[in-house]
């Protein structure tokens, strides 16, 4: 299900209308909009809790953005901008779908999101507590965002439990299936990247030539399995029939949204099956 609702959320990072909405409230530059939009559900947070919650960004990078961005836009303005931009993006991408299709998808996705367990999941809980949108696309995007942040919180918990730090996690993904260029913008120095690769080698996850080992693949598969297990509750609550129906409703939206997500996106979103 993540592969179907994540593209709906991800338009907020990549669609020109989403970028324009942030710029309209004074958040010029990609990272200002990113940090303001994702942090805003937490209120006017400073850097330390965001460094912890976002996990994969180098602390100096987060500290440059926070709390300075709140001098450009308040959290309330950032929330309005991110929802406005996302809804405008989705409206452009889904204009051929009937209103009833969008409304039914929003109803089902909201049901799944409302059933999610928020204990220990800070970003997910903060998004779940936001007011429900008035129109189907706003409701759809907010529910997708709540579910993806809840899943992300669970993924970070699994990484921490496995003993992986942020830069080790990024270095592992580069070794497996992501381009280094897509992740270099997260603020870590070349020395930190090198040290992380060395730690993964000592751990037995990378071979001497930097390629993944069977031990590493099995270890990370366990992390992914733990992430999926922690994210199952909304779909168990929704039930197999309604989950299947929701998947069918989301499928054309997800395909349309994939078109604005760069192939080397750091989200690591796989292509939908044809």
Image: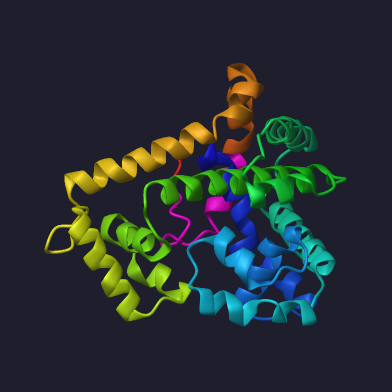
18 to 234, vertically: above or below: below
Q: Residue at the location (73% across, 30% down)? A: 111
Residue lying furthest right: 134
Q: Quadrant of the C terminus?
A: top left
Q: Residue at the location (46% across, 61% down)? A: 265
Quarter of the image holding residue 102? top right
- Give the left or right position of residue 159, taking residue 110 as reference: left
Q: Quadrant of the N terminus?
A: top right
Q: Residue at the location (72% across, 50% down)? A: 127
Q: Residue at the location (54% across, 35% down)? A: 231
Rendered image coloring scheme:
rainbow
264 to 139, vertically: above or below: below
One can see residue 95 in this view? no
Give the residues drawn in magenta, as a range: 252-270
- Give the left or right position of residue 86, taking residue 210 as reference: right
Q: Where is residue 270 shown, x and y percent of the image?
A: 42, 47
Quarter of the image holding residue 215? top left
Q: Where is residue 90 shown, x and y percent of the image?
A: 70, 52
One can see residue 166 in this view? yes
Q: Where is residue 165 shown, x and y percent of the image?
A: 40, 60
Secondary structure, magenta segment, majority class? loop
Is 96 part of what is drawn in magenta? no
């Amino acid at each position: 299900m993540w592969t179907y609702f994540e593209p709906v959320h991800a338009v907020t990072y990549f669609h020109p209308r989403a970028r324009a909405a942030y710029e309209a409230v004074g958040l010029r530059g990609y990272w200002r909009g990113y940090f303001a939009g994702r942090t805003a559900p937490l209120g006017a947070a400073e850097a330390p809790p965001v460094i912890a919650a976002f996990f994969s960004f180098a602390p100096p990078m987060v500290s440059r953005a926070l709390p300075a961005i709140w001098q450009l836009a308040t959290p309330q303005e950032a929330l309005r901008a991110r929802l406005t931009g996302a809804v405008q993006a989705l409206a452009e991408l889904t204009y051929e779908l009937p209103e009833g299709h969008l409304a039914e998808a929003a109803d089902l996705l909201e049901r799944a999101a409302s059933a999610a367990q928020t204990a220990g999941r800070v970003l997910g809980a903060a998004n779940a507590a936001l007011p429900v949108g008035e129109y189907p696309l706003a409701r759809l995007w907010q529910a997708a965002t709540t579910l993806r942040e809840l899943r992300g919180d669970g993924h970070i918990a699994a990484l921490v439990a496995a003993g992986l730090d942020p830069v080790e996690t990024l270095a592992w993904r580069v070794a497996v299936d992501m381009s280094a260029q897509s992740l270099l913008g997260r603020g870590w120095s070349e020395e930190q990247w090198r040290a992380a690769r060395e730690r993964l080698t000592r751990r037995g996850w990378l071979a001497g030539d930097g390629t993944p080992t069977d031990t590493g693949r099995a270890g990370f598969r366990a992390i992914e399995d733990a992430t999926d297990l922690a994210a199952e509750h909304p779909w168990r609550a929704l039930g197999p029939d309604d989950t299947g129906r929701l998947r069918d409703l989301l499928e054309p939206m997800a395909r349309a949204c994939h078109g604005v997500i760069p192939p080397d996106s750091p989200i690591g979103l796989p292509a939908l099956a044809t």
